[in-house]
Image (cartoon, grey):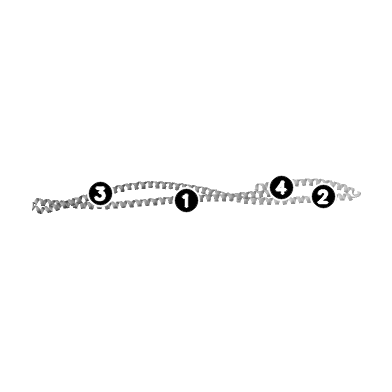
Amino acid sequence: METEVDGNMSIGKTETEVESLRRELKLSKETTRLELQEVRRKAKAVIEKSSKENERELEALRNQLEEAVSVRENLEAELHTRKLEGEETEKRIQDSRKEISELRLKLEEAVSQGDEAKKPASPSVETSVKIAELEKMLGQRQNEVSKTKEKAKQMLKEMNAEKRELEAQFKVELEESGKKLSDAEKSRLATAKELAEANKGLAGAMATINDLQGTLKQLKVDKESSAVAVESAHARAEALEVQYTEYKEHARTALAQKDSTIAKLRDSSRVVDEDVQFQIAEGHARAEKLAAKLAEMNIVEHNLEVCDYDIHRRVHRQVEPAI
């Protein structure tokens, strides 16, 4: 009975350990899954945020660069137009100078030939007036050319200043964008490192889970082995108990037969008359022998009790290691 109770307690303890390991395994799996989801979510958010910010900054830089290029092209086109106008004005001035030179040559030829005094006077006055007008026009054209050149120089100066300002601004923005890209790359690397550590932790957790599963399987095997050992011990105990019961019944039967024989002998001694004194004496002798046998039977009964105790103790010793 004690062996059966011990076996049941051992089985109950094993089942409790198995159930505890199952709960720990389930909790470990759930915790690892939640941690991995959180790390992946953070990494995805950081990467998306960094990518969107970089795209917006690059788009703004592209727009600024396109605007600067457009302004520069417009300024270059206007400068080219003013340059063409200046070249055309210069050409007109050259033509006017050439025309004035030709008129002067004609005037000198007319004066040197010494023709009639009245006739050349009129052309000379007209020529002088025309020369004066041409010189005035030439001066105006030269002033316009000078103004155009000054204006072109000023525009070129302003354009170069604006160009330098745009280049400096673009350089600063480019450095800031490079710094932001570097920070984003560092953030991405840090996130990748966290993700690698999370994967490493997941691998460790999976190894722990595998170990727990192996332990769980071993506990199941041990539980089955313990159940088989307990059943075997129960069977051996039941067999020994049957043998003990049979032996005890046999001893009780022998004692009952002894008591019956003694009772019969006593009844016979009461009804025996004096004629059978010899038989009575003989009966007493036999009674003494039976008393001796009774003492022997008492010893046998004591030995049976000792044997019973030894059997119980052996059963307990055999069942206890199996548990």
Q: Is disc 2 surrounded by few (<14), some (14 to 19) or many (20+) residues within 10 Å?
A: few
Query: What residue would you read off at disc 2?
Result: 259
Q: Amino acid at mark 1?
A: Ala
Sequence-first disc among 1 and 3: 1
Q: Mark 2 and mark 3: span between their CA atoms?
A: 161 Å
- Secondary structure state at the residue bearing disc 2: helix
Badge 2 vs badge 4, beta-carbon distance below 8 Å: no
Q: Amino acid at mark 2?
A: Asp
Q: Mark 1 and mark 2: span between their CA atoms?
A: 100 Å
- Secondary structure state at the residue bearing disc 1: helix
Q: Mark 2 vs mark 3: give the one in front.
A: 3
Query: What residue would you read off at disc 4?
Result: 312
Q: Is disc 1 surrounded by few (<14), some (14 to 19) or many (20+) residues within 10 Å?
A: few
172 sits to left or right of 209: left
Q: Residue at x 29, y 52 (%)?
A: 78
Q: Is residue 27 visible?
A: yes
Q: Residue at x 34, y 47 (%)?
A: 165
Query: What residue would you read off at disc 1?
Result: 45
